[in-house]
Image (cartoon, rainbow, N blue to C red):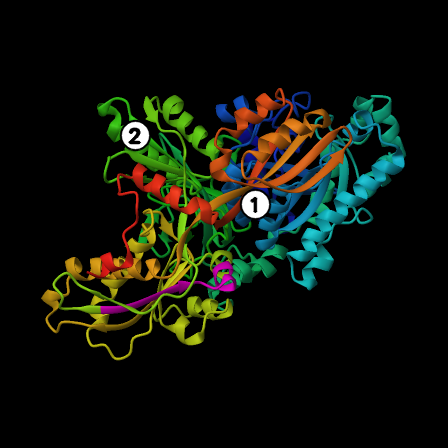
Amino acid sequence: MARKEDIAKKAETLMNQQKNIRNLGIVAHIDHGKTTLTDSLVAAGGLMSEELAGKQLVMDFEDQEQARGITINAANISIVHKYGDQDYLVNIIDTPGHVDFGGEVLRAMRAVDGVIIVVDAVEGVMPQTETVIRQALREYVKPVLFVNKVDRLVNELKVSQEQMQERFVKVIAQVNNLIKRNLPLEYAEKWTVKVQDGSVTFGSAYNKWAVSVDASKRTGVSFKDVYDYCKSENQKELSKKSPLFSAILEMVTKHLPSPVDAQKYRTKVIWTGDIESEAGKGMLNCDPTKPFAMMVTDITVDPHAGDIATGRAYSGTIKKGDKMVLVKSDRAIQVQKVGIYMGPDFVEVNEVPCGNIAAIVGAKEIYAGQTISSEDIVEFESFKSKMEPVMTVSIEAKNTKDLPKLIEVIRQLTKEDPNLSASINPETGEHLLNGMGELHLEVNQYRITERHKIPIQVSTPIVVYEETVTKKSPVLEAKTPNKHNKFKISVEPLPKNILEGIIDKGLQGKIRPKDKEIVEKLVEIGLDNELARKAWYIENKSILVDTTRGIQALHEIKELVVQGFIDAMKEGPLAKEKCFALLVKLVDASLHEDSIHRGPAQVLPAITRGIYACMLSADPLLLEPKQTLAITVPENFMGAVSRELGSRRTQISEMRQEGDQTIIVAKAPVKELIGFSADIRGATEGRAIWTAEYAGYEPLPRELQKSTIAEIRKRKGLDPEPKPASHFLE
């Protein structure tokens, strides 16, 4: 077993040979065997003993991951692999499979050029498998396929050879169908996975064997042999003849692209700057001599080193002492150290050229998604995510003296995990933590109490709703408190194609006249050309547009109008929940000639209250978050599961048999899933395995609107009934 520092030195010598670098992620549905597979690859690189591979789960190094038996954090490791007569540097990111940590997968996709999709041969392509495949393809990350747990087909389901082949054909067809649906034709044809060319491998990560067409030619082990070895329970012998790492790494080096090849087509997808510029050419050609450009994909807060920013370098080279720019924040940083991550350990190296995944010490107050460069360039495209925080808990320090420490810890956690957000309830002063689900929030509560030793009190989880409208409002006139200024405003629902385009392109924030690329994107997704040119701001998938003409001094209060719009979008009129998918138009304005009469105290409430009045005149309603459940349960517990689902407003979309197991796919409101984990375990004597996937927001049934609004308002200390539109125009 080699030392990590020695492997890192070897890796450093290969970092400049971009043709021989492979950056890959390992993605799958939860429990399909990603981390077990990674163990064998790590062992092959000499970083752990082969006996422990599959048991140690070296990439799950956080105590929570080991205790729960799931991956929570995406973890990086670099190994050196010899293929033919060449050494290859393989940078691996092991990603989580649980939906609550899907943001980790999304960010990892920006750092890699290829993925190994792991699919359980028994369960097949599950909802979360579909999600991670879409995430990879949206970033133009090329897939290969590993069909895992093949031994279960033979030993547990007792299938024949023909039935085993039929299973394989079905899984490959499902994966290829997803590839074809999510890529342009030119890539879809080239990127489909095929048994014949070796881009599909079959095996057992736990038992450390794998076969592919290419591996069979080398080892002489056929599919018939595989069946016989599994049937006779002699998988140890099989792993000696056809080791897992050998077949997988052969597939990776042969079928996944190097950074030099990948950046030729990926650059245009993830960066909207001028391709003919120095920085553009540097990224397109993965040129280490051009200006440095890197996108931060992950932040680790180290108690000694401070913030460590990990990300993919697309152009140039970075070394200790370099001065860099944090693009768009107009801040310069000095690099104190550069290195690579080997599992939990940061290993320092002299420099990291483009095409590699670098870790930088010295970038304070930096967040995932930011661009680091040696010059002021166009920043990288934001992560394209449809996921939203759907659950909130309030957290209070048990001891008042711990409050400053708690604030600092929450700040660290939200920096490390951009899918976690925090706010302060102004009425009560308690901290509100917003996350992707119960497990996500539980893990972060554990980190506060166990890792940082702060005793806290935590409320029961609260579901996050959103407010929207269903029709166009009339144009209403809102007045400032001093009655000297008037604003005519209208609100309407954002068309579905524009909403999906905003989500898909990650559009958010200020739109200035010089931001031509944002205006072009708005037109591209279907917004009228005139409206796109007059758009001022995008907040929570809602757009503020100025449709006024020739209003004197409007530019002087533009920032106040925008702030009033942001305030309204953060807390709507129904229940002070976020607003969603609105097109807000400033139609006309009448302003006092003296600026002293149109300050923040006048303009802000007028805009916010005007938007509220319009919303309340446009048939407003609450949207509730939903999740898609995938439940695997023994056949004899089907009735118990059906009863449990029936009591939770659940829509069952699919039910299929896999051997003696039944797989149920259903959609359920997040509110109904609070406590579901304990109930389903009790109903099935702990036999059910289930996962949930974010399925977006949908209208809350009309019959539940009034009672839910009253319940939320009561919880927030408001009157149970929302005020009428006329109240906000007084």
Q: Magenta includes 621?
A: no
Identify whether 523 is placed above or below 627.
Answer: below
Report if residue 26 is visible in the image. no
Q: Residue 203 placed where, x, y %?
A: 76, 33
Q: Is residue 103 toward the left or the right of residue 143 in the image?
A: left
Looking at the rendered structure, which numbered label has been put on residue 406? Answer: 2
Looking at the rendered structure, which numbered label has been put on residue 370? Answer: none
The mark closer to the camera, 1 or 2, is 2
Identify whether 571 is placed above or below 627.
Answer: below
Q: Which stretch appears magenta?
A: 487-500
How packed mark 1 is, by other alpha carbons closer than 10 Å (few <14, some 14-19, many 20 or more), is many
Q: Residue furthest front?
A: 703
Mark 1 secondary-structure assignment: loop
Report if residue 101 is visible in the image. yes
What residue type is disc 1 on? Answer: Met
Q: Magenta includes 498?
A: yes
Looking at the rendered structure, which numbered label has been put on residue 15? Answer: 1
Q: Nearer the viewer, residue 689 or 650?
A: 650
Q: Please tell me how many numbered marks the rendered image carries.
A: 2
